[in-house]
Amino acid sequence: MSQPYDAIIVGARCAGSPMAMLLARKGYRVLVVDRTTFPSDTLSTHIVHPLAVAALERWGLLARLQASGCPPIHTYTFDFGPFTLAGSPGTTDAPVAYCPRRTVLDALLVAAAAEAGAEIREDFVVEEVVVEDGRVVGIKGHSKGAPSTIERARIVVGADGRHSVVAAAVRPEQYQERPPLLAPYYTYWSNLPMEGRFETYIRPYIGFAAAPTNDGLTITVGGWPHTEFEANKKDVEGNFLKLFEAVPAFAERVRGTRREAPFAGAPTPNFFRRPFGPGWLLVGDAGYLKDPITAQGIKDAFADAERCASALDQVFAGARSFDDAMGECQQVRDAQAMPMYEFTCQLATLAPPPPEMQQLFGAIHGNQKAMNAFAQMNAGTISPAEFGAAVAGPQT
């Protein structure tokens, strides 16, 4: 029987591979398994907000993303109809965002984990999370065409998204739950230049956005309230194109383009999960999920992976107990995430902003410092509370 690993990580995308990389760089023995192979696609809005870009730079991976030809995004625009707010989403240290295809980003992260020394098993199906005496001790699964095997570890990490097999096995408490609020879809277009902008268009009960991605393509994401999901999914293309008609200037831009992929999408529930217990840990979307309308998933996954890898290093080194270290991770995660979670859930209803919010938007229009703060709030660079403080001065 093989020696147990320090950590087995189920899921090799934006939470799993960075965590594996960071642990392996510390010298720990890490196994990463994923049911798919890389490069491969997954449902995603793709946006890597500036704070996530800063993480890639800390990890020494930003140059690889830049080498993929993914164009930088220096401006976020928010078109409300009567006016448009346009600002910089980042800071002096991390001024831009990117919107890479997941075929590019995830493969880059998997390669980095392997280079750090993590063992990667692609096309691996987890059949069972192994529990002994109430504690998770490993996984049972198999690679394609191979017999089942049991691998053991000091900790099993679920980084396998909203349908996490680890979460399904340990059944953690869920809290702050909200039902699906939005029915989003996305696709790609050629010949739709964005000139370094991430454009968002908001109209009553509809919305869509567009951003440049790899291979000269532009991703468009749009949707309707979840109450319209069943009716509109019968003709996704027709209803999606009607979104553009609400903004004639954008609809005109699309007429000269070509759609290069099918429509993809799925409604998303909203929840927090208790992210740890005896022998197990949940990171990324497996532990905390919200609607993709604010495109925070990749940024949050990177932050969660970095925070939990640092905490596990302390645990493995004997400096802290597992419960103490992971309890602090949960507290920090929730405190940092909750304001954006509430903002996201409100935004996902696609309800018109209340009058006081419309007045605020109108007042900050043309004030570049305030518009930058609005873009930074939407990017998660600053919190909604920090945005309120930033614009309080100009409004008095």
Image (cartoon, rainbow, N blue to C red):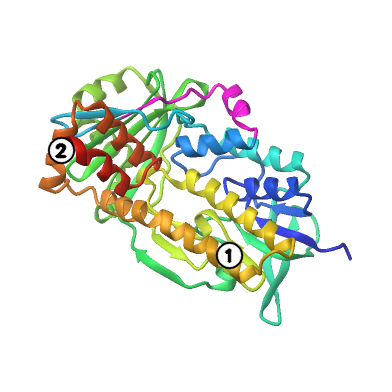
Question: In the image, what residue occupies the spot 48% across and 57% down?
Answer: 333
Residue sitting nearer the eye, 5 or 1: 5
Seen in the image, is 35 located left or right of residue 274?
A: right
Residue sitting nearer the eye, 327 or 146: 327
Q: Which amino acid does label 1 sit on?
A: Met
Q: Which label sits on residue 326?
A: 1
Q: What stretch of residues is rendered in magenta?
A: 60-76
Residue 47: quadrant of the picture:
top left
Q: Measure the alpha-carbon separation of dots 1 and 2.
A: 41 Å
Question: In the image, what residue occupies the spot 66% across and 80% down?
Answer: 134
Q: Residues within 10 Å of mark 1 (few under 14, many from 20)?
A: many
In the image, residue 112 above or below residue 383: above
Q: Which amino acid does label 2 sit on?
A: Gln
Question: In the image, what residue occupies the spot 36% across and 20% down?
Answer: 257
Q: In which quarter of the image is the N terminus?
A: bottom right
Residue sitting nearer the eye, 66 or 246: 66
> Residue 125 location in percent, x, y?
68, 58
